[in-house]
Amino acid sequence: MLVVQAAGLATVAGTITLAPVEREDWIRFALLVAAAVAHLEAARRMERIREVSSEGSGHTHLQSVWFFAAVLLLPPPLIAGLLAVSYCHSWVRVYHRRAVAHRKAFSMATVVLGCAAAYAVLAAVYPEHGAPFATELDGPLGLVAVVAAGGLYRLVNYGLVVLVILLTNPDRPARKALGHASDQLMIAGAVGLATGFAVVLTARPWWAPLLVITVLALHTGLLLPQFRDASRTDAKTGLCDPTFWSELAADELDRARRLGGRLGVLLLDLDLFKRINDEHGHMAGDAVLRAVADAIKHAVRGHDMVGRYGGEEFAVVLPGLGVDDVRHTAERIRAAIASVTVTTIDLDGAERTIGGLTASVGVAIFPDHGLDRTALLLAADAALYEAKDAGRDCTRVAESARPALPAVWQTQEPVVSLARRLSGRRRPADHRSPSRPPG
């Protein structure tokens, strides 16, 4: 990794005087920076989930549209400047300064080398170019040049990332490091969009915003459904389903271990929810669950993971927070739930407004209360019992660390259900256990 980072720095230093920077270059640079930043802002929560869920394989995203467009439009110094702005912005806004710094530096170095390789291909095909390469692309030669440059761009970036993953994870299957075949199609599409954007920007600059919107629409329109399908998302609330939430929580826990950081887990149970179903019907209950889910999402940060664990129970993972911050977040969530009002049709056909909701919350912190996912959930579940026993409508923090459980017990079923069977305890009567999904 250090060799690749050194090669990236050497490439930037060696190409900084390769081509002059003109006024038009600065204008194109500013437009590409604005497009890259807008792209990340529009998709940052989705990118955060994709980056966490792709742990152990290369993470592919459509920022390559702007990176490859920069190769076709900008001199080398400004290409490096665009990469620096994009990676710094993603460090702050997508990863919230919690990503492993040397890994992100390595990723940026691989993109620098990939862009340099693509630039070298285009320079070899058009040795006398005096304007952006995008103005030279024409006929079969232009098509071959773009395909060759795009292929080498991907090969250098992807090959170096996969090599390092294989070297640092020798116990994992090589197939995992390669990622999904669809990633290659995504980059091929990014190269095509980048070429179109570069050509339009040089020939018809006022049309460029249309292509920026196209990239954003394709990204959100094609990738967002992947995180809303039945295998990942709870149909009633739109939150992560138990299995997907557990996977994301495990990935965040691994990240906290590597960074030596902290992580909070909340288990939330709506108090006396069964009364809503009994008095107003299950459709009203479902409407309340949706409203509560929205309230929880708006009460936490954009990169916190919220899931539904069946019935009226919710789970939240809070990366990077200690006991006090997690407790404050739990209280903020309880306040948000208390302000929820839902207007629905009652069993007798009359319109009713449901409000005055309360919730009990159990809190557990890594590494204070457990070192693995199951231990943390056991601790949070025990704290939730204490909140219920204390009269409901309150937050309780786990008292002591829970021992790590054997790996054979780390199953794919909803972990809270597992925790309950291990603890052998029962909730108060307001818990609607029959509606929980089967393990």
Image (cartoon, rainbow, N blue to C red):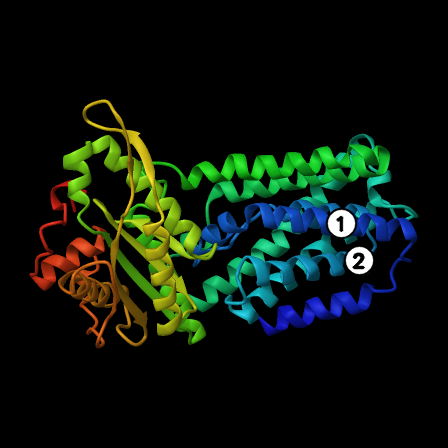
State the CA–CA distance, disc 1 to disc 2. 8 Å
Query: Element under label 2?
Result: helix
Say whether residue 123 is visible.
Answer: yes
Q: Position of residue 112 (x, y in %)?
A: 69, 60
The three-letter code of the residue at mark 2 reads Leu
Residue 436 visible here:
no
Q: Residue placed at 30% from the left, 31% from the top? A: 344
Query: How far from the left and from the top, in percent, is residue 113?
Result: 69, 60
Tag 1: residue type? Ala
The answer to which of marks 1 and 2 sits earlier in the sequence is 1
Rendered residue at 74%/40% (across/down): 146
> Residue 29's mark?
none
Residues under numbered marks 1 and 2 in contact, where contact means CB atoms less than 8 Å apart: yes
Q: Residue at x 30, y 61 (%)?
A: 266
Quadrant location of the N terminus in the rendered image: bottom right
Q: Residue 120's x, y, as percent?
A: 78, 53
- Mark 2 burial class by Cα count in 10 Å: few <14, some 14-19, many 20+: many
Look at mark 1 in the image and give the residue it sits on: 70
User: Which quadrant would residue 423 be assigned to in this image?
Assistant: bottom left
Q: In the structure shown, which secondary structural element does the residue marked by tag 1 occupy? A: helix
Q: Quadrant of residue 386?
A: bottom left
> Where residue 60 sits in the image (x, y, percent)?
54, 50
Of residues 327 and 219, the one nearer the viewer is 327
